[in-house]
Amino acid sequence: MSENKVNYMNKTEKSSIKAHKTIRIFIYIIQLFILASIQQVPGFIPEIYGGRPLLILPLILTVALLEGNYVGFIFSLVSGIIMDLSLGNHIGVQLFVIGIIGYILGKVKEKLFKDSVFTFIFFCILIEPFFIIMRFYLNQGIFVVNQEHIKLMFINHIIPGVLYTICISPVIYLFNRPIFYFIREKEAEQN
Amino acid sequence: MKGILLKIFKNKFFQITLSVFLFASGLWLYTATFHENLFSNVVNIVVVPVQEVLFELNKNLDDMVSDFETHNKLEEENTALKEEVRRLRELSVDCYSIKRKNEEYQRYLEFKKEHTDLKFISASVIARDTSELFYGFTINIGTGSGISEGDSVITENGFVGYVCGVEPKASRVRTILSPNIKLGAMDSLSGDIGVISGNIELCEKGLTGMTLIPSPNTMKVEDIVTTTGLSGLCPKNLLIGKIKELSYDNINFTNYAVIEPFEDIKKVKSVLVITGFNGKGQISQGAIQQGS
């Protein structure tokens, strides 16, 4: 009789955790589509020194840091598909790279780091420049013919874009973090 | 009879009525005779100030009520006017939008009249990727509207680029600022031909380049550059831009011209996609001869 009760409790707890996780993922997905749309609309986000932020990337890092490797990996894959489709060439490259990043970040965070703004900014500084440079090269192909052009590309587009993205990243993280903990608290209360 | 009369006269009500009647008659006779209203004067001394006070009080009360009513009315009127202003503002925004679209269509109509052989569809720029260095963009029409890869993209001012990727509902456009574009171009005055291809340095200034210009040539600064249409990929004589500078390309060892496009490609918002024209897909005899 008592075993049945324990089983029943476990089942209800599990379904509650699942429901709360689904709510959080739903919120992330909505944000993903909103950010993916606004980052592309011409003139919606002002250019600073020729750079425009890549808004999806901080969201992916946020989800991976908050939710861990499993959700981080799945979410990164979905985001990767969207980013690939927006470029329209080399489909699968961004999906693969960002999927791996999402998984590793979730795993590293679980093992080594505590969830904090500083951890997030640390990972932003580590990952965002690499990913944005890769994206520029994927989009433009081999077009750089001399050193002067590489310098121009970095000074006028890549560096401002990277800095802009890094500066805007904590906003996305700080928006999602309270939502995450609020839903987690509700989940704990119910269980 | 005498007893009845006596009884009546003794009645207090009758006495009062009679005395009032007599007093009133006397007063009437006096005022009618001497044209003086003594009583009225006496009464007025007391009544007029009270009346004045009451009148003022009433006036103020009236003003207050009227103010209150006016305030309510004004408030209602204000709300109605605000609503009207909002509606008119919306209407004016719509008007501006319609006016702008109308001007745009007017220009497109003129363009269509000039180029009767062209079949084109208008489209809006809906996205520019953050990693786009050469101002490539996405438009809101795709295969569903009859767009195919390689279709030329223009505005009423001139050539913008071509479609480099199509989806059912959207297409990606590569601009003439990109080094990945190779477009046959011709100096409309001298007839010298070359290939339009940009680079990042020129792109920063909103310019593009023309390479592989034969030597000798008679090209000059300010000459107008148009499409050749030799490849059959885009119609001929579409305006591209004007020559800003003539130089020599040390990398490709060829004459080089810096071209200033007629359209501001960095800010383009609506375009026309040419889906059909006379000679589409047919390589011209001139191009074959040049190739051989």
Image (tube, helix red, strand yellow):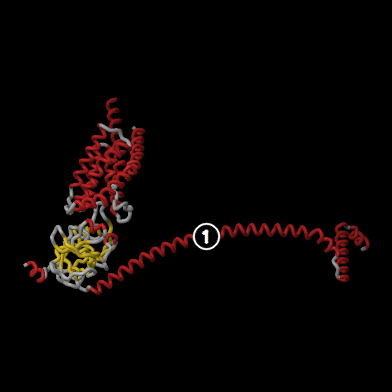
Q: Which residue is mark 1?
A: B78
Vertical order, A34 against B173 (above or below): above
Specify whether residue B65 is in view: yes
Residue A177, given in percent of the width and then of the height, sits at 34, 39
Vertical order, A96 against B101 (above or below): above
Vertical order, B205 against A60 (above or below): below
Quarter of the image where one finds residue B254:
bottom left
Q: In the shown orientation, is residue B16 left or right of residue B103? A: right
Residue A183, given in percent of the width and then of the height, sits at 34, 38
Q: In the shown orientation, is residue A158 left or right of residue B218? A: right
Residue B37, given in percent of the width and then of the height, sits at 84, 66
Quarter of the image where one finds residue B238:
bottom left
Q: Residue at x 27, y 68 (%)?
A: B157
State the quadrant of the C terminus of chain B. Answer: bottom left
Quarter of the image where one finds residue A171:
top left
Q: In the shown orientation, is residue B11 left or right of residue B283? A: right
Q: In the shown orientation, is residue B235 left or right of residue A180? A: left
Looking at the picture, tell me which residue is in the foreground, B126 or B235: B235
Looking at the picture, tell me which residue is in the foreground, B209 or B165: B209
> Which residue is most to the right?
B2
